[in-house]
Amino acid sequence: MAGYNFIVACFFIGGIMSFFMLHPKEIEKIRCERRATIVDVRERERYAQYHYKNAVNIPYSQEERWLNQFCENRIYILYCEYGNVSLLAARRLSKKGITVYSVIGGINAWQEYAGR
């Protein structure tokens, strides 16, 4: 893939987990090309204040139910405030064999990019 989009591959006991890191400028491109679902993993209060258009809110803090809300046959783009939580979430989903992208710098980077 071109641009800032790159794959992170990590080894763990039992195989390889991988997910993609995505620059904010590529969100729409990947969403359209891959028919990906955009997921805001922040708390509901933060989501209510502002969020990426058409994003669904699945807070990562609700770990008990969180993983069950994703399907293996779908592609997801995750973001949080700064990119740290979505990175952890992407790692967790990729271990389950789900194709996932994490937005570098989170919604703050996207807002900075969009504000140009």
Image: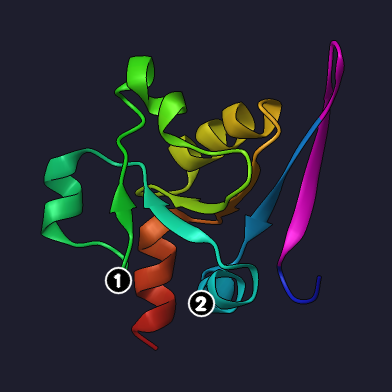
Given the image, on which type of amino acid does mark 2 rest?
Glu
Q: Position of residue 87 (x, y in %)?
A: 55, 39
Name the residue at the bottom extreme. 116
Q: Which residue, given by chain and number where applicable, does mark 1 sit on?
A: 53
C-alpha gap between disc 1 and disc 2 = 10 Å
* Horizontal side of residue 21 vs 36, given as left or right: right
Q: Nearer the viewer, residue 99 or 79?
A: 99
Residue density around tag 1, few if under 14, some if 14–19, many if 20 or more, within 10 Å: few
Q: Quadrant of residue 52?
A: bottom left
Write down the region rendered in magenta.
Answer: 5-16
Q: Is residue 1 magenta?
A: no
Q: Position of residue 38 (x, y in %)?
A: 43, 58
* Horizontal side of residue 98 vs 84, given as left or right: right
Residue drawn at the location 36% of the way across and 30% of the way down:
60
Mark 1 or mark 2, earlier in chain: 2
Q: Which residue, given by chain and number where applicable, does mark 2 sit on?
A: 28
